[in-house]
Image: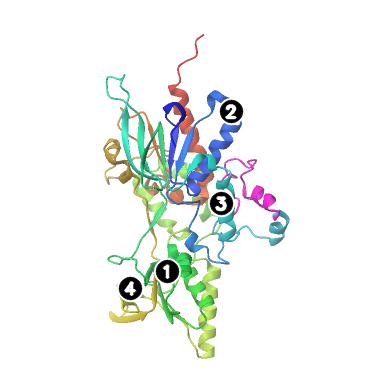
Amino acid sequence: MSQPGDRPYDFVGVGFGPANLALAIALEDHNARSVREERLTALFVERQPTFGWHRGMLIDGATMQVSFLKDLVTMRDPTSDFSFLAYLADRGRLVDFINHKTFFPTRVEFHDYFSWAAARLDHLVRYDAEAVSVEPVENAGSAGGETTAFDVTVRDAAGNPVTVRARNLVISGGLQPCMPPGVEESERVWHNQRLMTRLAAYAGPEPKRWTVIGAGQSAAEVTEYLHRTRPDAEVCSVFARYGYSPADDSPFANRIFDPEAVDLFHGAPEQVKRRLFDYHRGTNYSVVDLDLIEELYRRAYEEKVQGRERLRMLNACEVIDVREVPGGARTTYEFLPTGERTVLDSDIVVCATGYRPFDALGLLGPVAALVERDDRDRARVDRDYRVRTDPAVTAGIYLQGGTEHSHGITSSLLSNGAVRAGEILDSILAHHRAKEPAPVS
């Protein structure tokens, strides 16, 4: 895992999901067209044993919510051979996909595309390797204690600590599952992130009643899937809204995901950022594709006609408590219009209750004290996704995700991933060249 001659890597990427995969591709493209002296060295560390992206939600038939053109490279470089179209050609499905007449491939297919790209970059990645701490490395020759690199402690598959040194860090820890307050995952209480893997491992009696908590896309997908694949079971969907809210994917609203929108958002006053974020929450947060909403309504209505209602929509209901009980799980919810509380017993409860950003600053340890903060204790992040630090720190820290406050809704989404990766690589290159000694005339 160490660099030959113990030279620092130009950057170490923490995490190897789609965001850092896009960065690895940008690096590979750069090195392929550069002379030896301008190439960069990098290592990505990933705690999973192989590449994987939301494996637990690879529901058959579920489609992507972004166009295939917003893949790992096309928005940055349409000629790259890491594009989704290049993948289709390699798999022998390009003509078939064209005939399919869709911009939105299935999630299973897009995961296969990501895996195809990741396999071509195995030489840059160490799997089963979890970054656990970061220490600043000071330049012994500098009077002011200049921090020129970071030592990253990585725990390998055997639990052994290994240290790698980097001139820059790019942290992309992804999103972490968020359970309702006070609720823990257990044998009978799941988070939707692991739905398919939990289903495959489940060895208990066939559930007769499922409860799904949440009102977003994942909750609706889980509800649809369980209702479709468990024909003898009742599926109860519990959410505080009166109904699922449709996603706003209209062309003008989608401009919030344009690269230029990131420029404008980053430079806007704080109060404007908050307004723009609130205006366009409906493009991404707790919303559902209209086709899926209509399909679930069609099923619920059809069951009313037939007199056998397996799909129960418990709307305007706020979840008060979820706990495991012998042989199942118990949900207590309150019907908001009247305040009446009801206890609902199920075999399994699936919490489709969202995600929270990875705590990048928590990983940094003592280095976190060198990060500049705003008046709400958030990291100050420049337009190139480089965290502002004490002037004595010349090594760079870059964030992929966790920058909604500075860069807007696209911070952790696929929509702008290719462009974001290019901007981070360009920034690393610019700082690298600035540190190079001037040529002798």
Quadrant in which the N terminus appears? top left
- Chain-order first, disc 2 or disc 3: 2
- Residue with the mark numbered 2: 34
Taking the spot 45% from the left edge, 70% from the top edge, the residue there is 244
Q: Which residue is mark 1?
A: 215
Q: Is residue 60 magenta?
A: no
Of mark 4 and mark 3, the one earlier in the sequence is: 3
> Which SS class for mark 4?
strand
Q: CA distance from mark 2 to mark 3?
A: 26 Å
Q: Read off the residue under disc 4.
A: 318
What distance separates the C-alpha of mark 4 from that of mark 1? 11 Å
Q: Residue at x 42, y 29 (%)?
A: 8
* 315 to 137, vertically: above or below: below
Residue occupied by mark 3: 115
Left-right relation of 317 to 421: left
The amino acid pointed to by label 1 is: Ala
Quadrant in the rendering for residue 201: bottom left
